[in-house]
Image (cartoon, rainbow, N blue to C red):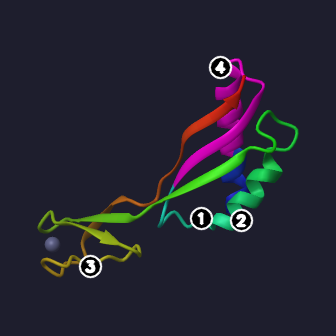
Amino acid sequence: MHEMSLALNIVELVAAKAEAAGAERVSEVEIEVGALAGVMAEALAFCFAAAARDTPVEGARLLMRELAGQAKCLACSHCFPVDSLLGQCPECGAYATELIRGRELRVVSLVVDE
Ligand SMILES: [Zn+2]
């Protein structure tokens, strides 16, 4: 499952950061998920809880912030919001667009217990 490998990556990253900070427990993890990343929030939350078991991240709250998609037209350089991978430029009608935001998934911050 796609979400499971993402969750494992997040837990691994967060656990490493917590360890580097000398923290024993992570209580909260905030991530940004692009609207077009193809991630199901519920599935990711479920997998995160499972992946965190027996790690310093176990029981941490997962806050997900959704990033709206944005594309740039390759013909006229206009930037516009998109909700699918096949965006059409609203300015010139071109389909030659580049997605500049919306597929990312990254850890923004974490809260640790000292
Ligand atoms: Zn355009």
The answer to whether marks 3 and 4 mark residues whose Cβ atoms lie closer than 8 Å is: no
Q: Position of residue 17 (x, y in %)?
A: 64, 27
Q: Given the image, on which type of amino acid does mark 1 rest?
A: Val
Which residues are drawn in magenta?
9-32
- For the residues carrying marks 3 and 4, which lies nearer the camera in this image? 4
Query: Which residue is rendered at x = 55% and y = 38% of the image?
Result: 109
Query: Which residue is rendered at x = 66% and y = 19% of the image?
Result: 20
Q: Position of residue 27 (x, y in %)?
A: 72, 38
Q: CA distance from mark 3 to mark 4?
A: 45 Å
Q: Is mark 3 within 8 Å of ligand 1?
A: no
In this rendered view, identify the residue nearer to me: 38 or 60: 60
Mark with earlier residue (3, 4): 4
37 vs 5: above or below: below
- For the residues carrying marks 3 and 2, which lies nearer the camera in this image? 2
- For the residues carrying marks 1 and 3, which lies nearer the camera in this image? 1
Q: Is residue 93 magenta?
A: no
Q: Quadrant of the N terminus?
A: bottom right
Query: Which residue is rendered at x = 55% and y = 67% of the image?
Result: 38
Residue at the disc numbered 2: 43
- Tag on residue 88? 3
99 vs 91: above or below: above
Q: Residues within 10 Å of mark 2 (few under 14, many from 20)?
A: some
Q: Quadrant of residue 60?
A: top right
Residue at the disc numbered 4: 21
Q: Position of residue 22 (x, y in %)?
A: 70, 17
